[in-house]
Image (spheres, grey):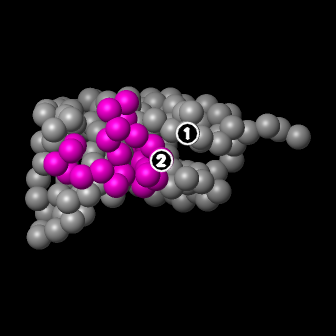
Amino acid sequence: MALTVMPTAANAEIVPGTGIADISIGMQGDEVIAMFGDPIRTTNGTSPQGLPTESMYYPGKLKVIVSDGAVTTVRTRSRSERTFDGIGVGISKSQLRRTYSSATCQRIGTARSICQIGDLIPGEVVTTLRVHRRFITEVSVDQFLD
């Protein structure tokens, strides 16, 4: 019987510009499966650049997107994952801006915003925080491709 390690509070951490829950951008998809076991669900798709992708869904509202064998996105909607400074799902946009003064936010409609930590330069890793009604609802760490 294989022992799998599921994301726990000990490793449920968001590291802006790097990854979430010990899953880093650029890590091989096989490494993710070795760490966390088989996902509870997978879907196949295509990236905006036309590359095939595989989305792997894990317990704890964690989604990992793999393209060409490597992780390009890690996304969470879990309130248990936080940055070292305490930022994550459920935290206010104002607290995010106080903690990360470099974060840039763009309003989308009347109740939504998208905030980013990092520069939108091809090849760079950007942390995106989706905000609804003043509170963070989703955090993703993505390799910005273009």
Q: Residue at x 13, y 33 (%)?
A: 102
Relative image position of residue 94 (x, y in whole percent): 16, 48
Regarding residue 50, the answer to whether it shows in the image is no
Dividing the picture into quarters, in which one does residue 5 lie?
top right
Magenta region includes residue 71: yes
Residue position marked by numbered label 2 in the rendering: 80
Given residues 100 and 52, the one toward you in this image is 100
Q: Position of residue 143 (x, y in %)?
A: 33, 36
Query: What is the CA distance from the residue labelled 1 to the residue labelled 2?
Result: 7 Å
Residues at marks 1 and 2 touching, judged by CB atoms closer than 8 Å: yes
Residue 43 within the segment the image draws in magenta: no
Q: Which amino acid type corresponds to the residue marked 1 in the rendered image?
A: Ala
Label 2 neighbour load within 10 Å: few <14, some 14-19, many 20+: some
The magenta region covers 70-96
Q: Position of residue 35 (x, y in %)?
A: 65, 34
Q: Which residue is mark 1?
A: 9
Query: In the picture, residue 30 is in which quadrant?
Result: top right
What amino acid is at disc 2? Ser
Mark number displayed over residue 91: none
Disc 2 is placed on an element classified as loop
Residue 12 visible in the shown view: yes
Classify mark 1: helix, strand or loop. loop
